[in-house]
């Protein structure tokens, strides 16, 4: 008799797809905290290799920390640009190129928002 959480359909299933069955999903239960089952390479998140010990680490330019830092800096540059537009220091309608807006970016449209942003920057510098 199957477990009740399997029959209710609320348990998470493995996201792997099988070649032999025309890319149908694997129907096993996903291992705790992962997206795949034990047959498809589930590793506990705490035991997963990270940083230099990871097999695909080469130069460290695309580690999660570095990518997050780049996104933060991109948002900062965009906000500074918004303020320059607000103050009229930059004319025209051309922002920095690139359609993908950085994560955490919120456009500054009023002087009050600009003041808030500058206060946050000052506080982060003094810490
Ligand atoms: Zn599976």
Image (spheres, rainbow, N blue to C red):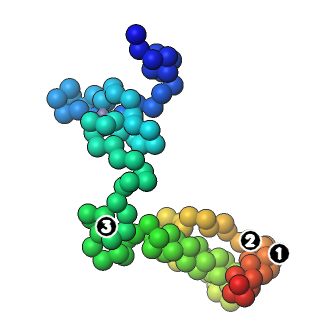
What's the residue at 49%, 16% (across, down)?
A: 4
**Quadrant of picture, ligand 1:** top left
- What residue is disc 1 on? 112
Nearest-to-viewer mark from 2 and 3:
3
The mark nearer the N terminus, 2 or 3, is: 3
- What residue is disc 3 on? 53
User: Real-space Cα distance between discs 3 and 1?
Assistant: 46 Å
User: Real-space Cα distance between discs 2 and 1?
Assistant: 9 Å
Q: Quadrant of residue 108?
A: bottom right
Residue 32, image x, y percentages: 44, 38
Question: Quarter holding the N terminus?
Answer: top left
Q: Is residue 24 left or right of 11 when viewed as pictured?
A: left
Q: Quadrant of residue 22?
A: top left
User: Real-space Cα distance between discs 2 and 3?
Assistant: 44 Å
What's the residue at 27%, 39% (across, down)?
A: 40
Q: How many numbered discs, if any?
A: 3
């Amino acid at each position: 008799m199957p477990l009740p959480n399997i029959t209710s359909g609320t348990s998470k299933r493995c996201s792997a797809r099988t070649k032999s069955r025309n890319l149908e999903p694997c129907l096993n239960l996903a291992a705790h905290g992962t997206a795949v089952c034990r047959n498809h390479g589930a590793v506990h998140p705490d035991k997963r290799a990270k940083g230099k010990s990871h097999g695909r680490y080469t130069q460290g330019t695309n580690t999660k920390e570095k990518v997050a830092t780049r996104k933060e800096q991109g948002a900062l540059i965009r906000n500074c640009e918004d303020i320059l537009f607000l103050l009229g220091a930059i004319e025209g309608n051309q922002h920095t190129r690139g359609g993908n807006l950085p994560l955490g970016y919120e456009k500054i449209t009023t002087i009050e928002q600009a003041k808030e942003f500058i206060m946050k920057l000052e506080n982060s510098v003094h810490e």
